[in-house]
Image: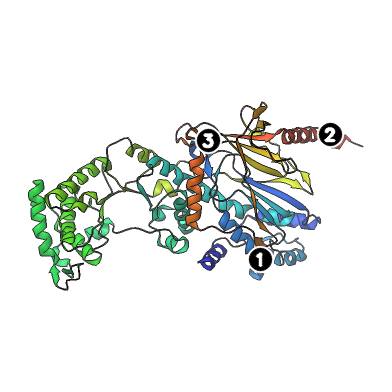
Amino acid sequence: MAKALERSIRERVPTLLTDLYQFTMAYAYWRSGRHNEPAVFELFFRDNPFGGGFSLFSGMHDCLLFLRSFRFTDEDVEYLRSVLPPATDPAFFLFLRELDCSGVTLHSVPEGTVVFARVPLMEVSGPLAVVQLLETSLLCLVNYASLVCSNAARFRLAAGSRRKLLEMGLRRAQGPDGGLTASRYTYVGGFDMTSNVQAGFLFGIPVAGTMAHSYVTSFSSLEEVWPQTLVAANGDHDNIDLISLTKGWLGRVCELLGAESGKIHEGELAAFLSYAIAYPHNFLPVIDSYSVTCSGLLNFCAVALSLFELDYSPLGVRLDSGDLCRQSVEVRHVFRLCSEQFSIPAFQSLLIVGTNNISEYSMAELNKKENEIDVVGVGTHLVTCTRQPSLGCVYKLVEVRGSPRMKFSEDPEKSTVPGRKAVYRMLDTEGHPFLDLLCLCEEPAPKACVAVRCHPVVGNKTCQSITPSQVSCLRLEVYTKGQITQPLCSTAETREKVQSSIQTLHPRHKRLQEPDSYIVAVSEKLRNLIAEIRKGSSNNSNFLLAN
């Protein structure tokens, strides 16, 4: 499986999957002899997504595989020769052909960690031309993965812990790679299953799915059911006529519920029977192709009761239209009646799956209304991140040749924080994080139970004194000298990390609506550096007037 993942990343993110200006800048660095200057970039985002209080860092696994396989082929170089300006020195293409990431070092927040706006998630250091060339690819790998993982976590918080969540957005995703990435990282973010078979193959995610409305509507008569018999699950080799058995049960169900048999759709019953014969242990049909109460539910109960009689265990039903909450209550009521009337205890606890253009809002509404939905399937609003299509991660230069660099901007929010940094998370007495502190690398680490003076990065920037009960260092070295230096976690292991990390958050920070703002601050020494660079930039603006 590891080889399949490595092959997948090479196919999905080839070295040419970047912006042209990365190559023009790399050439200019090379032409001026600056290409090997040591440089440091940081990757971060400026605002927490979806109006929420946090995000989840995802995509590092693929970043590491990308760095390890980063090389230009002869074909790559020949293509670049055709698109770069004709004045490009031919020797530059020889330089590209020999390029790799053996000189790159990556420090990163562990994948699956709760993160906040303005905190550097990754620090990429190495030769200037190389780390410049990595920008677009790393952003592409982190941006959507972190966004959709965060979206999934919000759906999980809205749903609560009891309900199972099924991701089923492949057909609505932005292309095959978007669909695959969504399936992977929605599972990491808290979903339980996916309908995406390739995601199950590559990442070990449980897959689920039974039938669509098209399967149901393709049948019109019981004559289309073939074969018509089923052998009992207890080992009895006699073939049982499932149609006759089900007709008998259907009459008893109609009598129990006072239903009109004339409104039952024969084609729907034929579809259910055909599927039940094919998969008697996995019978979970969609029951709203015609009418839930007048046909679908009755047909399901008759087929399910037949399966129980033959010692099989049907799974449940799927509702895909209308008022899911009301319908689920009605369906559960019928399940309980059948359970009691026909002495089948398991019937009352059959699954009810709800799927119908579910959004985060409608998911939260489920908890406010009476309902009996056990599993919710979510597609469009999950994988397309309808409320916010991009996380907006950026990749900014913070040091060259050991000298800090800072971007100024007409928009103060777009200014960057200069210098190589260490990132620390401050925890309160209950283990909840309450502040992330950015310090210069050379500063001593803050200590538990010792007061620290700091300045928030945004909002009220007045000096604060905080005393953490615990302090944790957020970043680790994960790649250096061409080697991945930390064990790669499986998708399931990263999923566990996400849930543990979210559980550490204080409720006020993980509220879906109007959460409290989490504080990200800089140390006094780092704040002084920012002030010095701003002052120096102002002084240097008069260089044209100098002798």
The foreground one among 142 and 547 is 142
Q: What residue type is disc 2 on?
A: Asn
Q: Nearer the viewer, mark 3 or mark 2?
A: 3
- Amino acid type of disc 1? Phe
Q: What residue sits right under mark 2 in the picture?
A: 542
Could you say where residue 95 lies in the image, as x and y percent from the top left? 74, 64
Q: Determine the secondary structure under disc 1.
A: loop
Which badge, 1 or 2, is on the more N-terminal residue?
1
Per the rendering, the mark at residue 425 is none
CA distance separating discs 3 and 1: 50 Å
Amino acid at pointer 3: Glu
Residue topped by disc 3: 430
Mark 3: few/some/many CA within 10 Å (<14, 14-19, 20+)? few
* Residue 260 seen in the current view: no
Camera-side residue of 324 and 14: 324
Is 403 located above or below residue 28 in the figure?
Answer: above
The residue beneath circle 1 is: 72
Q: CA distance from mark 1 to mark 2?
A: 43 Å
Element on which disc 3 rests: loop
Question: Which mark is in front, 1 or 2?
Answer: 1
Whole-percent x, y for residue 69 in the image = 62, 64
The answer to whether marks 3 and 1 mark residues whose Cβ atoms lie closer than 8 Å is no
Query: Closer to the N terminus: mark 3 or mark 1?
Result: 1
In this orientation, which residue lies closer to the viewer: 299 or 453?
A: 453
What separation in Å lies between label 3 and label 2 (alpha carbons)? 53 Å
When asked about the image quadrant of residue 117, the answer is top right
Left or right, residue 185 beside residue 26? left
